[in-house]
């Protein structure tokens, strides 16, 4: 059996497997509130963004969101791990860029916050391999080629003045956790 870490040292592959939502997806919309949507049993695979090695440069990894977010401060780009978002519910395209998600490994309960920097079309998440490894504490995700994660509501904890302008919110941060389809 080859681990994610071994694969990372063997080859830099663009995508290992596609992320798709299993038939058991449960979607609960937050009926008009800003809490976002939730889904369970979402398949999350991994992608080699290697943000640390690429200087947290969205252009260097050809991320879809680089058009809007590449010039954000380094502290903003490096605050959370990266993911492509291709969920069955939630924002799409530019509207998803920069949003943060809380991802929970269903099998272990381990959580990580990730920032959407890319898009995909396969119905789930494509996590940076480093985030995938942090979530895969029992090795099952590596063995199966994917993790089953859940995503819920509730990361609207920071007030924002203007989501797209890059202006600071009351917490001194930009672009974090506002109207987020969280994964928790």
Image: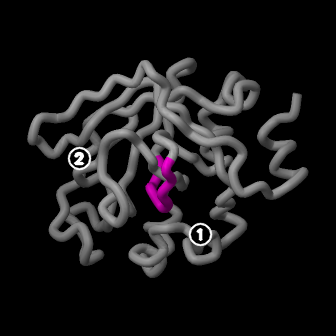
Count numbered badges in the picture: 2
State the separation of the CA atoms marked 1 and 2: 25 Å
In which quadrant is the N terminus drawn?
top right
Label drawn at residue 156: 2
Task: For label 2, count other residues whose C-alpha is less than 10 Å away and answer few (under 14), some (14-19) or many (20+).
Answer: some
On screen, 141 above or below 119? Answer: above
- Quick check: 152 left or right of 128? left
Percent across and percent down for residue 148 are 54, 26
- Quick check: 33 left or right of 134? left
Percent across and percent down for residue 181 are 31, 43
Q: Mark 1 points at which residue?
A: 56
On screen, 106 above or below 82? Answer: above
- Quick check: 107 left or right of 38? right
Task: For label 1, count other residues whose C-alpha is less than 10 Å away and answer few (under 14), some (14-19) or many (20+).
Answer: many
On screen, 16 above or below 1? Answer: below
The image quadrant that residue 141 belongs to is top right
Name of the residue lying farthest toward the left? 32
Label drawn at residue 106: none
Q: Which residue range is magenta in the image? A: 114-121
Label 2 element class: loop
Q: Is the magenta stretch mostly helix, strand or loop?
A: strand
Percent across and percent down for residue 142 are 73, 31
Q: Is 79 in front, or is 2?
A: 2
Mark 1 near mark 2, Cβ–Cβ under 8 Å?
no
Q: Is residue 25 covered in magenta?
A: no
In which quadrant is the C terminus drawn?
top left
């Amino acid at each position: 059996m080859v681990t994610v870490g071994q694969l990372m040292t063997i080859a830099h592959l663009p995508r290992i497997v596609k992320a798709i939502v299993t038939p058991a997806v449960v979607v609960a919309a937050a009926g008009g509130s800003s809490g976002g949507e939730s889904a369970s049993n979402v398949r999350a695979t991994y992608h080699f963004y290697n943000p640390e090695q690429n200087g947290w440069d969205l252009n260097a990894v050809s991320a879809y969101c680089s058009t809007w977010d590449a010039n954000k401060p380094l502290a903003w780009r490096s605050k959370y791990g990266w993911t492509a978002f291709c969920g069955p519910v939630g924002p799409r395209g530019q509207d998803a860029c920069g949003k943060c998600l809380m991802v929970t490994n269903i099998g272990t309960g381990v959580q990580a916050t990730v920032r959407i920097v890319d898009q995909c079309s396969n119905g789930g998440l494509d996590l940076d391999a480093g985030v995938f490894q942090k979530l895969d504490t029992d090795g099952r995700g590596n063995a199966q080629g994917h993790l089953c994660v859940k995503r819920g509501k509730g990361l609207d904890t920071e007030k924002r003045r203007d989501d797209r302008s890059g202006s600071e919110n009351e917490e001194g941060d930009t672009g974090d956790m506002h109207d987020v389809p969280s994964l928790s």
